[in-house]
Amino acid sequence: MPTHRAKLILITCAFFSILQLSLSVPAQDKSKETASLSGRVVDARTGEALAKVRVIVSGTDQETTTDENGAFKFENLTAGKIDLYITTVTFGLVKKSVTLKEGDNSNFQIALNEDAAALTESVTVTTAPFENTDTSGVTQQLLNKRELQQLSSVLVNDPIRAAQALPGVAANDDYRSEFSVRGAPFDRVGLYLDGILTENFVHTVGGGYLDSGSVSVINADTVDSMSLMTGAFPSKYGDRSAGILDIRTRDGNRVKPTGRVQLALTGLAGVVDGPLGKKRGSYLVAARKSFVGYLVRRFNDQLNAGNNPPVINVADFQTKAVYDLTKRNQVGVSVIFGNFTFDETTARSLLGPNQVLHGDARNILVNGHWSFTRDPHLFWQTRVFGLRSTFKNINPFDKPLLDERRTQFGVRSDLNYQIRKNRIETGLYIRRLKTDSLAQRFDFFGTTAFDEGTFKHSGTEQGYYLQDTWSDERRHITLTGGARVEHSGVTHETKVSPRGSFAWSIDEKWKLSAAAGRYYQFPDFNLMFGLFRNPALKSERATVFNASLERLIGNRTRVLAEVYDRKESNLFFSLNEPRVAGTVVTFDGLPFQNSLNGYARGFEITVQRRSANKLAGWISYGYSRTKLTDGQDKINFVSDSDQRHTLNVYANYRFTDTWNFSSEWRYGSGQPLPGFFGRDSLGYFVVNQRNQTRLPYYSRVDVRLSKAFLFKKAKLTLTAEVLNLLNRNNVRYAGFERFFFNGRVEGQLQRVLPILPSAGIVIEF
């Protein structure tokens, strides 16, 4: 039997054994409890599941990519607050803070925004990938943010150039943003920016010089949506007779301050946005500087070696703020300012007295709005705006060739009311226009000036519309009927434009649509009071009919076929071009008249797939025929923008979470050489038939490859781009140098973009 001392020794040994065991096993730390996290990443605009999205847990080595259903899962995470970084190429960077509980954390959804889209935590769930900005517009092509970014080009970041790839659009001049639609020039397409019909809202040399170019004043990073309507468009749009390009800028985000900086070989652009006043509003500030002079020097080195290229600088600034006064009332203001300079100082000794040595152009648009939302059934918005464009051209003798100021200010008010099956829309658009222009030419010595249309004039235009859209969800039918009344205080006309449309979803796959309308366009002041003036000009008129049939294939692909007929009358025209009259070459400058009548007819077929995953894009073919008759001289010819065959192809493919490839191919049969020109082996000469000689066909292939890199608090995307990959020798008519009395013409067509590689960097934070 152990002694008392032996017992004490045994108890002591047991105590130290227990103590040693307790020290060898750490105490349970509740902060180290493990958790799992599963969730899903979706497109914030459409609700579509996003595959190949990288999800990173900050402060750990854990990361994963989403599967085909947009799902992801993490195991063995530390319970508590963690930060997730979520992104993929062509989409923005999102940081999400999550508080994990011990165990399984599931059903977590993350909304990912497209490049340059406003950051948002909400998701718009829709099953219609081919949504429209205006449900009453039958013929409407909408560009989403990713398409807009890809097609704007890293070189100039121009949203109007993105529209050049849309079905029905012809654009054969690489130097210009403007385009034609269905045989009608860009001055017959209304460019609406946040509801305001703009005038000359591009960076360009004033005066209509054919050998110049243009770049949009609008920064693509600030655009929320852009849609093109080339058929019978709704009653809310007026004073244009061929189409509408509707651009809507985005608000700043209400989540947190974010930024995006884009640097390319030819310039840089940046945008910063974020919340205001406890997320009751938002702000956005954007700026862009394009070193287009590099492009000009590049073209000049290849095409005109030895000549001194002009210096071209483009800069613009944009800011926007919105604020919710109450749950029903919101106010906002936006300002867009652009500046353009053209300088030929290095070639001063080579310029004639009527060539531009130095050109300046400035545009500013101020747009304020008040919105009232009583309930989901009633919305009322009123805008007050002012727009000013100035152009000044100086010749080599430092004398003005053009000094022009164009101003407009006005008010727009729109009311939408939903009652049962009817959506009633009504509103007014009133603007005051003023133009003060000095235009002159000089003799050979540059001493004597000749007036070329100096004038100062102003006037008021008014527009009022009423439209009702009736929808029967059970029968899947939508009927729209309305009218617009427009009055010009300059031409003293009041015009009524009836418009209507019909849409029937035959079943889940088939949709039939049709529309018709009458449209008027008042003459520009330069036509009435400038060179070849005619103060008696009246409005031109177009009557449009179009019908389409749409077939869905699966959930993300459609085939769309459309036919159209646009009857035109009283179009503005002046026979101010050299031509053969009998056996004599004449150089008459006759006043503008409402003398042209004719038509534009054709069809378009589009196959389109719109998805945030894998392949997306479209293939579109358009066939068009135009015919115009001059009522005075009884001559027949096709329109200056006539293009019989147009093929537009765009494709985008996101291979992985960091690699994306896109490509664009635009093809068009040759447009007419505008004027009375013929051609033989010796060159060009003047004839008695207009628009009978055509330019060579146009073809251009662009490719773009993007690679994204993700850092802790930022994302970097490298972009390599090649324009005119096949180095196609496309040309444009930029005016001939001399005309001789024997009918011969001196001058050649001008080549546009050669093959042009570029690279850019985009930083998001």
Image: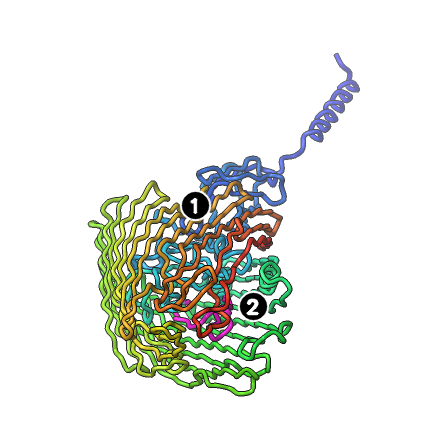
In the orientation shown, which residue stands out farthest toward the right?
A: 5
In the picture of the structure, the residue carrying the numbered disc 2 is 314
| Front one among 697 and 464 | 697
At label 2, counting other C-alpha atoms closer than 10 Å, the crowd grade (few under 14, some 14-19, many 20 or more) is: many
Assign a secondary structure to mark 2: strand
The amino acid on which the numbered mark 2 sits, given as a three-letter code, is Val
The one nearer the camera, 664 or 83, is: 664
Q: Measuring 57% from the left and 61% from the top, which residue is drawn there?
A: 270
Tag 1: amino acid: Ala
Label 2 to label 1: alpha-carbon separation: 32 Å
Residue 408 falls left or right of residue 561: right
Say how the picture is coloured.
rainbow
Asked where in the image residue 141 lies, by quadrant, the reply is: bottom left
Q: Residue pushed farthest top?
A: 1
Badge 2 vs badge 1, beta-carbon distance below 8 Å: no
Residue segment shown in magenta: 193-214
